[in-house]
Image (cartoon, coloured by chain):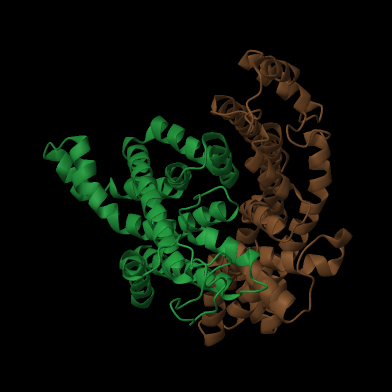
Chain colours: A brown, B green
Amino acid sequence: MGPLLLRRLLTALPTLAAVIILSFLLMRVAPGGPFDGERALDPATRAALMHAYGLDLPLPEQIGRYLWRLLHGDFGPSLVYRDFTVTDLVAQGLPVSLRLGGFALLLALILGIAMGLFAAARAGGRTDHALMLGATLLTALPTFVTGPVLVLLLGLWAGWLPVSGWGDGDPAHLALPVLALALPVAGAIAKLSRAGLATALGQDHVRTARARGLGPVTVLLRHALRPALVPVASYVGPAAAGLLTGAVVIETLFALPGLGRYFVQGALNRDYPLVLGVVILYAGLIILFNLIADLLYGWLDPRMRG
Amino acid sequence: MKLPLAIIGAILLAALIGPALLPWSHDAIDWGAIRAAPLSPGHLLGTDSVGRDLLARTLVGTRVTLAVAVAAALVALLIGVAWGATAGWVGGRVDEAMMRVVDALYALPFMFVVILLMVLFGRSILLVFIGIGVVEWLTMARVVRGQLMALKERPFVLAAEAAGARPFAIVARHLLPNVAGVAIAYLLLTVPQVVMIESFLSFLGLGVQEPLTSLGILVKEGADDMDVAAHALLLPGGVLVTILICLTIAGERLRDRFS
């Protein structure tokens, strides 16, 4: 376990560094700057602003300074939200996004694995085909369509759930965003767990369990499920990336004060430090989730511990 | 597989010739009919919040979305096949280095990289599809490389080599035609991916820009207006979902046939 984790970390850190440096360079070569407003600034003001934000220094020095501050948890000042640093904004947005994404991942796992179990229990039958078609449909549905449609159906027409806002983390306010975010991931997990179960059910230890006279439900849950979850675990990394991407839309749509909304606002406003900070944070989270997936691997399948 | 492809064909045909047959262009405003309901006179599917014909807008939006998707998927196909074929044919260290690049790019939060590009270099439709094409070629490269590795040990390749064919000719004339089926399956699966990304970007206001329209923009406009005019969301949303589902199903069936 140790060496594997170390090896993964050794590939992950250069990737993260490359993301940071590349994004930083891209920002600097891009035409147009944060001070290009509707009114042209007079040259002296402009120069003063450039100097105040350190934009007049040579590039390597700018990158060096940025990395150094990053190591101290300082993402620099926001260029648009003048009274806030990017660190402030991220600190406000991250808990909201983590809560949204965490619940969505949980719901997707429960829903997806349940679909996989039912399909595998009826392998080859109608239930199996219907569930797997359903899973394909779920993965093909984009969150920015399911989100508004769910709001329309459950919020506006049925009037069961609030349609937007955070409500200080009130569960009812979270229900629709979490559901919309979880559905495509649930579809992918359903397919993976169905495939994993099909493989596991053909293995020797499962045959032994059956030969000992255990019922189909016990065999499925106690003997086949754990090895079948290995492909699901490997999907946790990409799933986290998918959830983060989906969260950008969901947060915008439901007016939730999460990271994704700051990212979109930053992108529309050309708030470079904010966009850069969020991209780095997202890259870090995705790398973290890939590491977690590796750990899960070893836990689910002892043969992979080495 | 036939039904999904037939549906896609019908949508494509409607998007191509439909707008020419309608009295309204996608950005013409009918001041006398703002937020008209579906089936109202002159506007078969109603109008949006500023009186633009929804049928015309949906058809033009579909056309733009599909055009971007096909163009970007072709960019992905070209890069992916070239990259994968080179790595698979040359093998050894070159192969390892090239595949490392692919692995590293896979690890990137690519949607955010695309958004970063949009933010930095202006929101143009050209950049939308270059940006998407550049990140969507990775899977294609892996698949083509895997196929090529498997094929290049086969007798017909050895025969071609023995007959004195040049490496480039072997790859182009003997190997790539054998990879074409799988590549087409993955091309079919890349198109919905691209449709999804383009609509996602446009939904956020970072993709296709007004006065041009796309399904993503229409879904966004519909979502903003759905409390008074649900059809403005359901119509473009329905077309988008139909396209995505049909392409995904057709692509998956084709892929399963080859694997």
Q: Quadrant of the N terminus of chain A?
A: top right
Q: Quadrant of the C terminus of chain A?
A: top right
Q: In this view, does A1 lie above or below A80?
A: below
Residue A174: quadrant of the picture: bottom right
Location of residue A256 in the rendering, given as x and y in whole percent from the top left corner: 77, 56
Q: How many marks?
A: 0
Looking at this view, is B197 or B32 the one in front?
Answer: B32
Q: Residue at x 77, y 62 (%)?
A: A103
Looking at this view, is B44 or B77 the one in front?
Answer: B44
Residue lying farthest left?
B163
Q: In this view, does B230 lie above or below B91?
A: below
Q: In this view, does B199 lie above or below B247?
A: above
**In the visual, does B14 lie left or right of A244?**
left
Residue A153: quadrant of the picture: bottom right
Looking at this view, is B76 or B30 the one in front?
Answer: B30
Looking at this view, is A169 or A79 the one in front?
Answer: A79
